[in-house]
Amino acid sequence: MGNTDRTLRIIIAAIFAALYFSNTVPGTLGLVLLVLGIVFVLTSFIGFCPLYLPFGINTCKIKEK
């Protein structure tokens, strides 16, 4: 997972949290966004997204020698 991907995930997670805690998005949808935000933060810190594997997505730049 590349640095840009990690940064975007953390920003999106912060937006989801702000929407939930300000009651802009209440109820079930708010909880879904909050959980999704938590997943985004966790995958950012780990540096790996399990959904990228089956789809063959790689956002990390390949270093050439």
Image: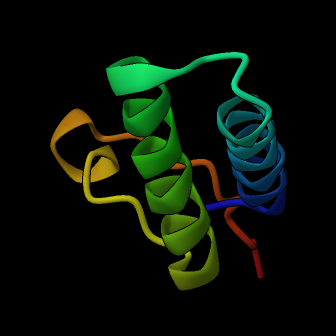
Q: Is residue 21 left or right of residue 41?
A: right
As drawn, is 36 to the left or to the right of 52? right
Residue 49 drawn above or below residue 11 = below
Q: Relative to residue 46, is residue 45 drawn left or right?
A: right
Q: Quadrant of residue 45?
A: bottom right
In the foreground, 34 or 65: 34
For the rendered model, the colour scheme is rainbow
35 or 6: nearer the eye?
35
Q: Residue at x 33, y 47 (%)?
A: 52
Relative to 44, 48 lies left or right: left
Q: Residue at x 26, y 59 (%)?
A: 50
Taking the spot 76% from the left edge, 55% from the top edge, the residue there is 10
Position of residue 53 relative to residue 42, above or below, is above
User: On the rendered image, what quadrant is the N terminus found in?
Assistant: bottom right
Residue 62, how many percent across, how many down? 67, 64
Q: Position of residue 37 (x, y in %)?
A: 56, 48
Q: Nearer the viewer, residue 45 or 34?
A: 34
Residue 63 image offset from top left, x and y in percent: 74, 72
Quarter of the C terminus within the rendering? bottom right
Between 44 and 32, the residue placed more toward the observer is 32
